[in-house]
Structures are given as structure tokens and as C-alpha cells.
Image (tube, rainbow, N blue to C red):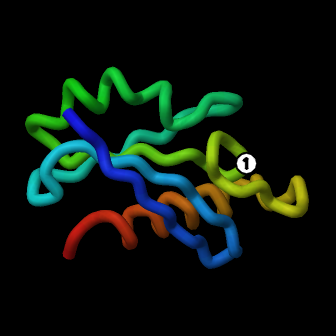
Amino acid sequence: MTSQQHWVNTPSDIRLFVETWGNENNTPIILVHGYPDSHTVWEPVAKLLANDFYVIAYDVRGAGKSSLPKHISEYHMDYLAQDLAAVADAIIPN
């Protein structure tokens, strides 16, 4: 199954790389990796889920193709939660 690539800008000026699989009309599921990985760790799982779900995986700030924060304090959980919300808002169809 082929994927689509997207870019999402967050409220804190971080640019996140996002990849999606499946039909956007299916139930969305967002896969979030840990450090020091990137969204690519989810590719085998995403391909298996893509027949039933709209699978979304992204590179968290400072990882993969996503941009780096300017300060270490910008890795705080509040920022990571805002990033997840930004991806959901930008990628999941209304």
C-alpha cells in the first residue's frame, strides 16, 4: 500500500513530517514513536492496519525529518501534546 506525505506546522513553529496510509474516510489512528526513533518504526504496522484504518504516523519534534526545537525546554510534554493535536487537526478530515 502506498503512503502520502504531509507537513504540519505547530503553534510553536515546529515543522512536523507526517506519513499516512489507507483511506481517510476510515477511522483514524495516530502512531507516535519514542526517542531516538522516527515514524519509520511504525511502517510495518501501518501497512497492516491500513485496510481498516486511516493510519497516521509522524516524526516527533527533533526526530526524523521534523525540525529541531531551539531550546531543550521545548521537549516538555506540553509541547509534545500540542504537536499531537496539531497533527490530528491538520490531517484528520472533518
Q: Residue at x 49, y 30 (%)?
A: 40
Disc 1 packing (10 Å; few <14; some 14–19; many ≥20): some
Taking the spot 46% from the left edge, 52% from the top edge, the residue there is: 18
Compared to residue 90, the image places residue 21 above or below, namely: above
Please state, as top left, top right, bottom left or bottom right, where the N terminus lies in the image: top left
Where's residue 44, x and y in %?
33, 21
In the rendered image, which quarter contains the C terminus? Answer: bottom left
User: Dividing the picture into quarters, in which one does residue 68 lie?
Assistant: bottom right
Q: Residue furthest top?
A: 44
Question: What residue did someone put label 1 on?
Answer: 62
> Seen in the image, is 51 located left or right of residue 60?
left
Please tell me which residue is depicted at 40% across the width and 53% down the height of the picture: 5
- Amino acid type shown at disc 1: Gly
Q: Is residue 63 above or below residue 4?
A: above
Viewer-side residue, 75 vs 25: 25
Where is residue 47? Give x, y as percent. Answer: 25, 28
Placement of 86 over or under 72, stated as above or below: below
Q: Residue at x 10, y 59 (%)?
A: 25
Q: Quadrant of residue 73?
A: bottom right
Is 80 situated left or right of 42 in this image? right
- Foreground of the two, 20 or 32: 20
